[in-house]
Image: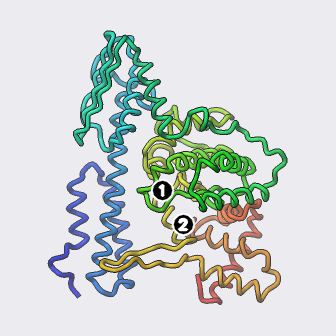
């Protein structure tokens, strides 16, 4: 049936909205269009009613465009910061000449903290002026007409302004102060086994679920997480641990948890020797330059910033999909949603109706493996590994190497990877069983 003339086709909506946002760029727009076309084809059989199908596609288009636009705004804002050497050494002369005594790096860092305190989002459109004559004035004009002015009397240096702003930002974000410092690395295991650490992780997560008090479990959570990272057999994403609320409106309350999980993700890659590149040489050096892992510096410069997950792993630091799959917060939105659909299920809202829950995709696989183990004693005790192999294949996608599937499956169970030949045999056996059971 045809869509009512009162309802805009998702294709027209997409063309109109992307045309109004040329900053997105042709490549991103083309990628978004390809995603929507693929979604349109795959969901047509599900939505027999064309009106409902178009409404669903409209919502998907709005979500994708909004996410891409938010990321683009952050990228443009960061490019604007680049002009004033926020993250690196000066590569060009500043737009406003400065007296020699003004440290522009510290001045702009102070400005960055002030913007964070004011919770100003979007692209900075205004101007920055600095004067040193016994008085420092910083004026910011932004697109949303919010002004932040700081006047420091008595001849304070710009460096003191920056230090003050950094202290306030650290206090707000919950990192960097003496009471919230990270454990000294490497953490002393004191003979604790991985099984004992996993049991402690489960107990910590249970306490957090009961009362939601992250500060009460933070120190122990960090120590256990860093120790598991040092052992290197149990990836962060597969651990039972405190979790961010599902509603983003509640994230501000748990900003310390979000920051800590980003630091833990970076530490995991550091412990595994994963080389990390960044658009800024300073960040690349911070992550790869020494054998020591500076938790406090990474928390302050990378974790506490109000950047999206997609920006952190696709523009700030370049992390492959295979590595992102192992992490909690350093994953792009698409990988997070795919993993949630696999192991937890999703909630879909049809226009004008209550949300409907879709069960986890692993549920029928888990049932088939359970029945298989009940019939075959050779499979008993290996149920978790076979389930992990299926999840690894789904996350890595078609064409994944058996060695990569085996590595990811082992990181979910917490053991060393099996030999490539053994893993290939298990994959073939699992696929044959699932085909016979009528599931995939």
In the rendered structure, the answer to whether residue 422 lies left or right of residue 350 reads right
Q: Secondary structure at mark 2?
A: helix
Q: Is residue 372 visible?
A: yes
Q: Return the residue found at the far right.
A: 191
Q: Nearer the viewer, residue 296 or 334?
A: 296
**Residue 364: which quarter of the image?**
bottom right
- Residue 58 in percent (x, y) is at 28, 70
Which residue matches tag 1? 332
115 and 36: which one is in front?
Answer: 115
Return the residue at label 2: 339
Tell me, for residue 132, which label it has, or none.
Answer: none
Residue 42 against residue 103 in the figure, above or below: below
Q: Is residue 290 above or below residue 396?
A: above
Residues 375 and 196: in front is 196
* Position in image of residue 249 (x %, y %): 41, 56
Q: Residues within 10 Å of mark 2 (few under 14, many from 20)?
A: some
In the displayed structure image, the side of residue 97 where residue 286 appears, left or right: right
- SS of the residue under disc 1: loop
Measured from the top left, where is residue 256 in percent x and y? 53, 46
Image position, residue 398 (x, y; %):
56, 70
Considering every residue shown, the one lying at the far front of the view is: 211
Location of the C terminus by quadrant is: bottom right
Q: Residue at x 42, y 29 (%)?
A: 109
Mark 2 touches mark 1? (CB < 8 Å): no
Residue 273 appears in the rendering: no
Q: What is the quadrant of the N terminus in the image? A: bottom left
Q: Residue at x 71, y 87 (%)?
A: 371
């Amino acid at each position: 049936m045809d869509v009512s003339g009162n309802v805009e086709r998702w294709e027209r909506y997409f063309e109109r909205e992307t045309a109004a946002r040329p900053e997105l760029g042709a490549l991103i727009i083309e990628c978004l269009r390809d995603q929507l076309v693929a979604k349109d084809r795959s969901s047509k059989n599900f939505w027999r009613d064309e009106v409902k199908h178009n409404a669903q596609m409209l919502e998907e288009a709005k979500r994708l465009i909004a996410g891409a636009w938010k990321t683009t705004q952050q990228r443009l804002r960061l490019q604007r910061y680049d002009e004033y050497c926020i993250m690196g050494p000066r590569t060009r002369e500043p737009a406003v000449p400065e007296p020699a005594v003004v440290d522009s790096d510290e001045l702009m860092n102070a400005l960055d903290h002030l913007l964070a305190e004011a919770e100003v989002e979007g692209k900075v459109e205004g101007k920055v002026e600095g004067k040193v004559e016994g008085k420092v004035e910083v004026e910011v004009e932004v697109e949303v007409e919010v002004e932040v002015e700081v006047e420091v009397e008595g001849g304070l240096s710009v460096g003191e302004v920056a230090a003050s702003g950094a202290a306030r930002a650290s206090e707000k974000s919950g990192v960097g102060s003496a009471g919230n410092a990270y454990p000294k690395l490497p953490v002393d295991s004191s003979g604790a086994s991985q099984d004992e650490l996993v049991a402690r992780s489960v107990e910590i997560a249970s306490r957090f679920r009961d009362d939601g008090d992250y500060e009460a479990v933070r120190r122990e959570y960090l120590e256990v997480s860093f120790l598991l990272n040092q052992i290197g057999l149990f990836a962060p994403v597969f651990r039972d641990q405190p979790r961010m609320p599902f509603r983003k409106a509640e994230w501000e309350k748990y900003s310390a948890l979000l920051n800590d999980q980003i630091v833990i993700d970076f530490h995991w890659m550091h412990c595994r020797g994963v080389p990390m590149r960044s658009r800024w040489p300073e960040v690349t050096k911070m992550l790869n330059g020494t054998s020591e892992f500076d938790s406090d510096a990474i928390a302050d410069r990378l974790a506490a910033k109000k950047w999206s997950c997609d920006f952190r792993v696709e523009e700030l630091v370049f992390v492959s999909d295979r590595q992102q799959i192992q992490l909690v917060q350093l994953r792009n939105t698409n990988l997070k949603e795919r993993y949630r659909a696999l192991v937890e299920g999703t909630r879909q809202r049809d226009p004008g109706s209550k949300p409907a829950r879709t069960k986890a995709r692993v549920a029928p696989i888990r049932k088939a493996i359970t029945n298989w183990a009940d019939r075959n004693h050779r499979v008993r005790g290996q149920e978790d590994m076979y389930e992990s192999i299926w999840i690894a294949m789904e996350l890595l996608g078609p064409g994944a190497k058996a060695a990569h599937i085996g590595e990811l499956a082992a990181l979910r169970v917490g053991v060393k990877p099996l030999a490539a030949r053994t893993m290939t045999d298990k994959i073939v056996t699992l696929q044959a069983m699932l085909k016979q059971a009528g599931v995939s």
